[in-house]
Amino acid sequence: MSKAGYTRRSVLKSGAAALGASALPAPMIWAQEIKNITLRQFGTGVSNLNDVANKVKEDLGFSLEMTALDSDAVTQRAATQPGSFDIADIEYWICKKVWPTGNLQAMDTSRIQNYDRIVPIFTTGKLTPETDIAQGTAPHSVGFVEGPGSTSFADQETGWMTLIPTIYNADTLGIRPDLIGRPIDSWAELLNPEFRGKASLLDISSIGIMDMAMVCEAMGEITYGDKGNMTRDEIDKTMAIFTEAKKAGQFRAFWKTFDESVNLMASSEVVIQSMWSPAITAVKSRGIPCVYQPLKEGYRSWGGGLGLSKSLSGMELDAAYDYINWYLSGWVGGYLMRQGYYSAVPETSKDFMTENEWGYWFEGKPATDVITSPTGDKLAEVGEVRDGGSFYERMGHVACWNAVMDENQYMVRKWNEFIAS
Amino acid sequence: MKVTRETVTGWLQAAPLTVVLLGFLLAPIITIVIVSFWQATEFSIIPAFSLENYQFLFGSPVTYKVFAATFRYAFITWAMTLAIGFTVAYFLAFHIRSQTVQIALFLLCTIPFWTSNIIRMISWIPFLGRNGIANQALMSWGVIDEPLEWLLYSDFSVILAFVHLYTLFMVVPIFNTMMRIDRNLIEAARDNGASGFQTLVHVIIPLTKPGIMIGTIFVLTLVMGDFITVRFMSGSQRANVGRLISNDIGLLQYPSAAATAVVLLCTVLIMIAILLRFVNIRKEL
Amino acid sequence: MEKRPRSFYVLSVVFALFVLFLYGPTITIGILSFQGPEGGLTFPMRGVSLNWFHELFQQQAVGDIWGAFRRSFALGLMVMVTTVVVSVMAGLAFRKRFPGSGLLFYATIASLVIPSILISLGVGLIFNQLGLKVHWATSGFGAQLTWTLPFGLLIMFAVFNRFDRSYEEAARDQGASAWQTIRFVVLPIIAPSLIGVALFGFTLSYDEFARTLLTAGSYNTLPLEIFGMTTNVTTPVVYALGTLTTAFSLLIIGAFLLLAWVMARRRARLGSDAGKGV
């Protein structure tokens, strides 16, 4: 990844960050000892960025060691190796699987300074008081537990949080407009025979099945009771439709890591596929046209958060709370939002973005100046508008969240069957 | 039984190997076997005896299909690596006369393996992809008009990668046995009027059998246990047993993964046991 | 020089094609590592530059290549030394008929044939059940040994099968103790083969993925790190790393061959030193 030079903007930013950091109540007594603290964080490369670790060292004084893993390894490590990490950067659907193992400890929301400003999606489940809660494993449904030692989820805010939300987004299909040459407006297009051999799907079952459901529903083939919690019958029907398409050669490949999706798209192997927002950004930054196509059926959404290992205590635990408070205080939010994700406390991120960037990424306004990524790659020209529009337009049209269903085990077996067919 | 000094020395010398194998081979196998009889809910492993995992495994048509696919990969890869490996070993053993050159050529073959396999796997995509080197070369030579789709994300690419990875495991043992063949036997065959081909079929191949067997053991076990190559090279579109296991592990279905693993392990061990009947590795190396 | 048969030329071509095939990915990596600053992991090339070699020595967006490289290198050396020592000892043991040798031999073969991911899973589960911390230098190290030791032992079999026992007998006749025989007669003779065991041990460990997957603990080895890096945008930096690795190994092997050549010439000039009673 190319590093931008030290621009005036980034100097201004770090100045602002220093201000932000000093506003935090960093107890001065252990200012010296805190330098010796090292927190070990793991997660996928999506948010385990070295820039964040460097900034933590600068602002908070302690060291953060980031280990990037693939999504399978993330689940396993969280579930089976509680001693190998201090902070887990995982997705909410993984939390649903991992929390009952007791490897993570609940967080006291009274110690989270920006708790009240967290987007309500993560607390009440409703983006605005009027919106419906989408199907699937919505973050708020696995976001709280009754008390510090509890292993079962609470259905409302309790003051004890499982994960502190960090980033999230509304996902849709990515397309190559130059190679398709006509408007795309429905999930059903993924199985359109026109794209035979040029389509791709995500091979992580908990996420892939939701994309499948969006497609089947859009085609009018299946009407689900709850896409996020399918019956065996619904799973069978969904898989049958996709198995048939697979056998007919609809798919060029399935991808499992972020990078594969970028390469498939950038090398023209695939023209339509499930994709993540920064992957689109990455394709675009190579000068290849790529659109994160909003679709009439809505988005499939996901969210990630930070969890604390149960083995954390004492000064390390305090440092972890400091880190989380810092995480929500804006710098990281701004950094991630400029990649196309959303921050859990958007208001604080605003201070770390230019008006143009905030307008483009959050408000859906046309860019008034060139939009660049945090690492300096050009992403949009003057006048361009973000695919899908503003935060409320995008997050307000979430049809379902990545999910762990009651029939998960059955679904996994069916997924294996699908891959083997 | 009389315990002699010699025996004690033998035991002492074998002790480190034994300790490693007990701790990191036997213990894991026992654990896996035990876990395979446990049950799992969505969230945790329940230590209770159950045959559910095996019932499901043997009751599912997917199992048979995936095992069949695994055998197919193993067999085709074996045949290809044997053909290529034998030829290469023959060339190195009988046509290259200087030992230094032999070593140099061997080392030349090993260099690509110093680059991480993950990186090499990523690089097959620009090589075999629609706009990859292979397709562009073929098109510029006028061999084809349209890019070949089956070069990548197909059984072809999976087997290609296997052959690429494992041929050397066939070359080394075959070369090793070839070097032990008494050159006088070949002279004798030639003196008796055997053609080069007859010498090959009646003298060299029979004498190389142990090397072929050992190479076969390497290749079969490597292919049967693989999961990453199949996933990368087929673009996740094909499955073998290893992928079944790794999918289950990824979704925390440990008991189910363990049951599949036990069946796979038994299959491989039976195959190897049969092969070992034909060759005494300890003597023939 | 004796005239080469026609089959020599045919086989030379086959061998050349085989080498070309082995180097296919290496060549692709080589070309793409010179990708321009805007280029990606696939064709087309977007300019030509040394940018990615430069980037390789900078901090990446995700992951810590050099930290992982150091760990992999250290682990490779640990595995290498242990493999050599343990294989030689076991090789010596197997020359005697000791009770249990058959069982141990089959266990070693089982270790060779067991699918890597099972070792990974099993070792991970055991450490978890025992409440031990998985770490690349403990669980990862042990898991890799189950892979390198069988190879080491098989090579030792091959070595000792070719070993002329009369050297040992001669030493013993002259009053050398068992240890002295090993130290001053056996080890020097088998030393060149030990380089082979060492190289094998290091290479197998350095590139091992599956066995380290669930046993590496908090910190990644290089293969795991690279895999982890693919969860974000991977740049041609990984190709630059591959190209450097290849160039580096070519260099080492070139030096090795040069040394062998110089020594051969020296020996030819000085004549054989056999019988000079050094």
Image: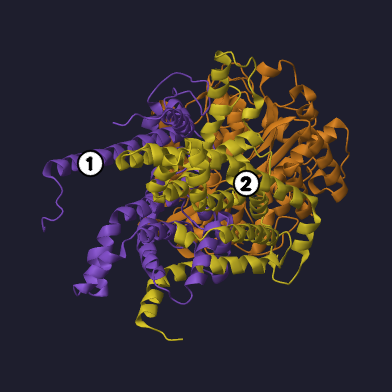
Chain colours: A orange, B yellow, C purple
Instruction: Identify the secondary structure beneath mark 1.
Output: helix
Please say whether residue B80 is visible from this viewpoint.
yes
Where's residue B147, x and y in %?
63, 20
Please say whether residue A173 is visible from this viewpoint.
no
Label 1 crowd (10 A; few <14 / some 14-19 / many >=20): few
The residue beneath circle 1 is C259
- Disc 1 and disc 2 on one polypeptide chain: no
Residue at the image point whose x is 24% and y is 66% from the top? C183
Instruction: Identify the secondary structure beneath mark 2.
Output: helix
Where's residue B23, x and y in %?
50, 69
Residue type at tag 2: Ala
* Mark carried by residue B74: 2
**Left or right: A34 with respect to C227?**
left
Residue type at tag 1: Leu
Where's residue B48, x and y in %?
73, 72
Where's residue B211, x and y in %?
49, 51
Residue at the image point whose x is 47% and y is 47% from the top? B174
Residue B29, image quadrant: bottom right
Chain holding disc 1: C
Residue B260, image quadrant: bottom right
Vertical placement of residue B137 versus A13, above or below? above
- In the rendered view of the protein, which quadrant contains the C terminus of chain A? top right
**Left or right: B234 with respect to C6?**
right
Between residue A72 and residue C265, name the one nearer to us: C265
Between residue C182 and residue A209, name the one nearer to us: C182
Vertical placement of residue C158 versus B88, above or below? below
Marks 1 and 2, how far apart in space? 41 Å
* Mark carried by residue B37: none
Q: Residue furthest front?
A: B192
